């Protein structure tokens, strides 16, 4: 028997929404504890860095293309380029290297 | 009056900042739509799933469950595991709200927590204006839903190298978000380097590489951020810089 696709979709929604909404609605005050505050301050940078590498090597088609995109992105961002230029440059590197 | 104008400005800025995110989403969700069609979803069902979930890895895992017609419980567990990182992001965002912001904004902002929207919104100085997040969501997540729909409908017409290049936009954005603070703070710089090293190591080492990508992200995020929090606790003013 095939399961109902809409029930599957609803379960996905219910679980994802609960994960996103519970901390936001339950933690209403500023957390005083310095370690917890520091932890939450560092979380975004670690998550984004962990998600970027090594995944970019796979996303780039070849590891070399992914590494090149990473290097170009880091250099541009380091010297002050914004979100959009950095993103486009990384994308362009991968596109061009796919012709090599 | 001033508040209304400020909200409108924040929304407009969000709309602008959401465009590169949306372009990346369009490519990734297009690929996701192809997966959805293989799993037997209609364009309507796949678009609905995207509007309700706003999660790449989460939806990909979900479509795999649908394809295999696994029990509903399995859908719940997989979604929980793959999307657990949103729990951390939600906790981090809870600290950015002004006490004056009405409660219902928390309910809406929650639905739009994605890796990218989270990344862009924590970059904002000071307290979080929910309208900035709504602007981001309006220009990016609409393209997320559209891309999923197109992926189901027109499948493999875009050249593969173009889809691949568009997919890298998202990583470029992540880089643009983490590098400026890394330049300013040696701790963040060290943390970013450590994240790259351990993330790579965990993808090749036995045992840990057997974990799903989502679980590895959670594990590394918790461990590395905890270590940093213990050894390099932040000063009060750092949070808003």
Image (tube, rainbow, N blue to C red):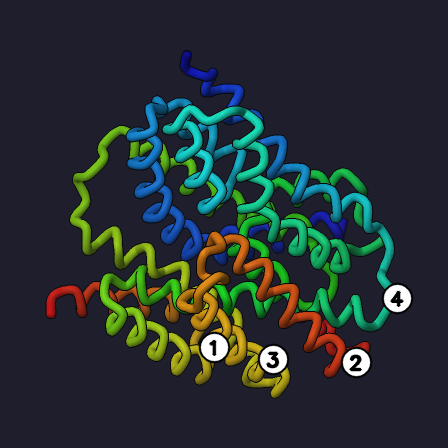
Q: Nearer the viewer, residue A96 or B189?
A: B189
**Label 1 sits on residue:** B197
User: If the image is split into quadrants, where does the C terminus of chain A sit?
Assistant: bottom left
| Same chain? Circles 3 and 1 | yes
In the rendered image, residues at marks 3 and 2 fall on the same chain: yes
Choose between B80 and A14: the one closer to the eye. Answer: B80
Residue A10 x/y as whole percent: 56, 25
CA gap between label 4 and label 1 equals 32 Å
Report helix, strand or loop for mark 1. Answer: helix
Q: Secondary structure at mark 3?
A: helix
Whichever of callouts 2 and 1 sits on the residue coming sooner in the sequence is 1
Depicted B41 relative to depicted B90: above or below: above
Q: Which mark is residue A32?
A: 4
Residue B159 horizontal side relative to residue B22, left or right? left
Residue B188 has which mark?
3
Classify mark 1: residues with Cα within 10 Å, few (<14), some (14-19) or many (20+).
some
Q: Quadrant of residue A5?
A: top left
Residue at the location (16% across, 64% down)?
A98
Location of residue B239 in the rendering, given as x and y in whole percent from the top left corner: 73, 72
């Amino acid at each position: 028997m095939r399961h109902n696709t809409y029930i599957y979709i609803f379960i996905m929604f219910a679980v994802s929404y609960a994960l996103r909404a519970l901390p936001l609605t339950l933690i209403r005050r500023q957390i005083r504890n310095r370690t917890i505050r520091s932890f939450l301050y560092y979380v975004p940078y670690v998550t984004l860095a962990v998600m970027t590498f090594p995944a970019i090597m796979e996303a780039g088609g070849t590891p070399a293309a992914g590494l090149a995109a990473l290097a170009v992105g880091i250099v541009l961002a380091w010297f002050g380029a914004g979100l959009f230029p950095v993103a486009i440059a990384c994308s362009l590197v991968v596109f061009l290297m796919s012709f090599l | 009056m001033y508040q209304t104008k400020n909200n409108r400005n924040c929304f407009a800025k969000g709309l602008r900042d959401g465009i590169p995110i949306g372009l990346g989403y369009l490519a990734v969700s297009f690929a996701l739509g192809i997966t959805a069609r293989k799993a037997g979803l209609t364009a309507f069902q796949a678009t609905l799933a995207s509007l309700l979930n706003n999660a790449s890895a989460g939806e990909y895992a979900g479509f795999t469950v649908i394809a295999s017609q696994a029990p509903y419980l399995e859908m719940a567990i997989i979604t929980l595991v793959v999307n657990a990182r949103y729990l951390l992001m939600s906790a981090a965002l809870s600290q950015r709200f002004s006490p004056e912001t009405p409660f219902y904004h928390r309910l809406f902002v929650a639905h739009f927590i994605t890796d990218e929207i989270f990344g862009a919104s924590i970059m904002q100085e000071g307290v979080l204006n929910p309208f900035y997040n709504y602007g981001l969501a309006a220009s990016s997540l609409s393209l997320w839903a559209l891309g999923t729909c197109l992926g189901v409908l027109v499948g493999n017409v875009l050249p593969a190298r173009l889809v691949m290049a568009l997919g890298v936009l998202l990583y470029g954005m992540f880089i643009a978000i983490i590098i400026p603070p890394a330049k300013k703070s040696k701790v963040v710089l060290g943390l970013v380097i450590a994240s790259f090293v351990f993330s790579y190591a965990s993808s090749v080492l036995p045992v840990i590489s057997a974990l799903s990508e989502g679980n590895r992200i959670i594990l590394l995020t918790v461990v590395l951020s905890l270590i940093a929090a213990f050894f390099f606790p932040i000063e009060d003013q750092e949070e808003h810089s």
